[in-house]
């Protein structure tokens, strides 16, 4: 799969590099990044310019060609930013080693999204922030079907248009704090957290309700 992304790296900035692609909504989400941050699937580094300055950031990606293109952007970041080739489903970091974990158009691309999210959960410290800018399957039946059909060919180049990323985030044990729409219910800014382990598990469950989607979608 990394071979496909190595190929796509050549034209990635031409096809995906426009600031018109919801730049302000992304910047608004990324301003919540804190201290030591992990950016999962950094790609060619298009998002780096939107990160708050002075953080300690690690950007990972499976594709060497993507990372090579991200290097000059990483060098321009005003703060320490390391790039590493790594699979999101097998992160080489200790448990609870990041304050923030960030994704952007990542969960449409990784082959095992829940497995990757479980890894993000593992490396995030309790109380830390999960920040995701992702496109997902619409709950509107017409748009949902359109995205299913589009996926029949986009998946050939590594992109799934119809993932239920919100459900996957919950399945990986994150607590969702907010979901904002950047475009209909298809492009979403998702904020989540990892709860500290509770001594009294029963009481915690009673306060939170059953695991599930208790959030409301805010449409801008
Ligand atoms: C649609 S691009 C998004 C890149 C960047 N986040 C952006 O928004 O411009 C998806 C990225 O996911 C990376 N990717 C795919 N599978 C991966 C995996 N298992 N682990 C890490 N990165 C992966 C690809 O190499 C590619 O750079």
Image (tube, rainbow, N blue to C red):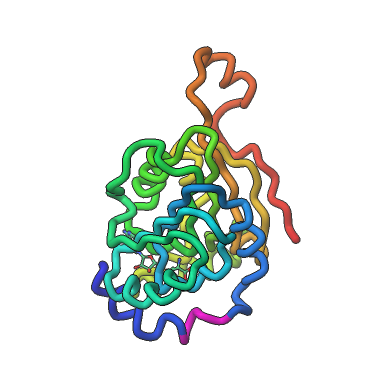
Q: Quadrant of residue 65?
A: bottom left
Residue 193 sits in quarter = top right
Residue 201: where, in percent of width, then height? 51, 16
Side of 24 where 73 appears, left or right: left
Q: Depth check: 160 or 69 in front?
A: 69
Across and down, in percent, residue 20 comes to 63, 79
Look at 49% across and 79% down and name the residue there: 16
Quarter that holds the C terminus? bottom right
Front residue of 66 and 110: 66
Residue at 66% x, 60% y: name it: 28
In the image, residue 83 sits, relative to residue 201, either above or below, namely: below
In-front residue for pair 23/181: 23
Instruction: Give the x, y percent position of residue 158.
Output: 35, 69
Q: Main secondary structure of the magenta part?
A: helix
Q: How many marks?
A: 0
**Is residue 1 rendered magenta in the image?**
no
| Vertical position of residue 101 compared to residue 28: above or below | above
Q: Residue at x 44, y 59 (%)?
A: 80
In the image, 166 versus 200, the foreground residue is 200
The quarter of the rendered structure image containing the N terminus is bottom left
> Which residue is rendered at x = 47% and y = 66% of the image?
161
Query: Quick check: can you spot residue 93?
Result: yes
Q: Which residues are magenta?
A: 14-18
For ligand 1, give the image quadrant. Answer: bottom left
Q: Is residue 156 visible?
A: no
Q: At which x and y percent is residue 174?
A: 50, 38
């Amino acid at each position: 799969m990394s071979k496909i992304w190595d190929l796509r790296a050549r034209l990635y900035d031409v096809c995906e590099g426009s600031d018109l692609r919801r730049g302000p909504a992304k910047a608004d989400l990324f301003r919540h990044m804190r201290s030591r941050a992990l950016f999962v699937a950094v790609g060619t580094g298009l998002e780096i310019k939107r990160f708050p300055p002075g953080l300690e950031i690690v950007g990972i990606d499976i594709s060497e060609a993507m990372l090579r293109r991200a290097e000059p952007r990483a060098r321009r970041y005003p703060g320490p930013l390391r790039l590493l080739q790594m699979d999101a489903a097998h992160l080489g970091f200790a448990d609870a080693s990041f304050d923030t974990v960030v994704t952007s158009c990542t969960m449409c691309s990784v082959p095992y999204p829940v497995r990757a999210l479980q890894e993000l959960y593992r490396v995030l410290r309790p109380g830390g922030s999960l920040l995701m800018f992702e496109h997902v399957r619409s709950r509107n039946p017409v748009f949902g079907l359109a995205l299913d059909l589009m996926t029949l060919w986009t998946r050939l180049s590594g992109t799934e248009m119809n993932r239920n990323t919100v459900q996957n985030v919950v399945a990986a044990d994150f607590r969702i704090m907010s979901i904002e729409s950047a475009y209909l219910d298809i492009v979403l800014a998702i904020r989540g957290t990892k709860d500290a382990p509770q001594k009294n598990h029963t009481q915690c469950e009673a306060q939170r309700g059953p695991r599930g989607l208790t959030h409301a979608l805010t449409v801008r």
